[in-house]
């Protein structure tokens, strides 16, 4: 089945120690998103890639970076995790047309739960 | 700024009760509308979506939603809930104008169904 895969499912890191979360997709979607979700809250968009074009949200801290080496993979790098960065990180994908319209239903991965000690 | 409001943050029902979760958005243009569900410990899944056409849309697991353009609403309904419907429900809206690809999310409604 086509899907969005996130690894690892659980990640424990130390305060200030860089961490990388990965996402892969077999849907061949051109848009990939990274969200942060804290307990009982809505997902908060950090950034997204439209093909190779990176789109950062204005309120995403510089501590969060992303890479998309190819269509299938996308990485979230947290350069110096703080206690406040402990959360579930969700990867999602969609197929979007050039004008941003179309049926961009987003497909979500299972998430990576990040714990910062 | 555009926003999505979900009226009930927590809902508790008994099995077989009817469900209606409210969702309103603030935007005067054309929108795509979504309801997502997040079961305990699971990932977000699409329940149903509206893009155009019949404003009454049917989704998975017996859920339906009605788009009322004049009220900027997209309420989710189910005639008879089950214990397995216990989950977090999110309404989301996509503005179709321009290059926008983002979803605007409501804060979510936590539904607990007692057996």
Image: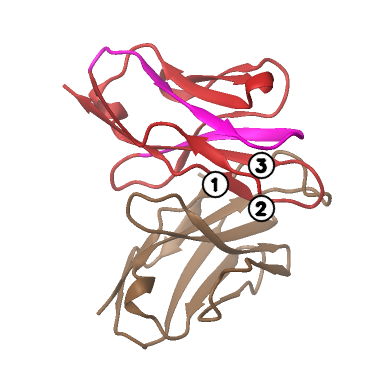
Residue at (69% x, 29% y) in the render: B51
Q: Residue A14 lies in what quarter of the image?
A: bottom left
Left or right side of B66 for B12? left
Which x, y percent locates residue A109?
A: 46, 53
Q: Quadrant of residue B54?
A: top right
Dot label at residue A107: 1
Chain painted in brown in the figure = A
Kindly check if marks 2 and 1 are in contact, taking CB atoms under 8 A apart as contact. yes
Q: Position of residue B115 (x, y in %)?
A: 16, 21
Depth order, front residue of B93/A8: B93
Going 79% across and 48% down the picture, which residue do you hit? A97
Q: Which mark is residue B94?
A: 3
Residue extent of the magenta highlight:
B15-38
The residues tagged by marks 2 and 1 sit, at their Cα atoms, a distance apart of 10 Å
Residue B67 x %, y % = 62, 21
Closer to the eye: label 2 or 1: 1
Image vertical order of residue A92 relative to residue A47, above or below: above
**Chain ID for label 1?**
A
Q: Is residue B29 visible?
A: yes
């Amino acid at each position: 089945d086509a899907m969005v895969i996130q690894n690892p499912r659980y990640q424990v890191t130390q305060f200030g120690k860089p961490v990388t979360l990965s996402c892969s997709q077999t849907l061949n979607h051109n848009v990939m998103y990274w969200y942060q979700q804290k307990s009982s809250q809505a997902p908060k968009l950090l950034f997204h890639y439209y093909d190779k074009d990176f789109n950062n949200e204005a309120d995403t801290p510089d501590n969060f970076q992303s890479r998309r080496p190819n269509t299938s993979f996308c990485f979230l790098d947290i350069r110096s995790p703080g206690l406040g960065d402990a959360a579930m990180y969700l990867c999602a994908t969609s197929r979007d047309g050039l004008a941003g319209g179309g049926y961009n239903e987003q497909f979500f991965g299972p998430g990576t739960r990040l714990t910062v000690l | 700024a555009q926003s999505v409001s979900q009226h009930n943050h927590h809902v508790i029902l008994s099995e077989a009760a009817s469900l209606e979760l409210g969702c309103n958005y603030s935007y005067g243009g054309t929108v795509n509308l979504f309801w997502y569900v997040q079961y305990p410990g699971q990932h977000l899944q699409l329940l149903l979506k509206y893009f155009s056409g019949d404003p009454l849309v049917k989704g998975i697991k017996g859920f339906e939603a009605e788009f009322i353009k004049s009220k900027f609403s997209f309420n989710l309904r189910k005639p008879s809930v089950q214990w397995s419907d216990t989950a977090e429900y999110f309404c989301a809206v996509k503005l179709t104008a321009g290059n926008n690809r983002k979803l605007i999310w409501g804060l979510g409604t936590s539904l607990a169904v007692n057996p």
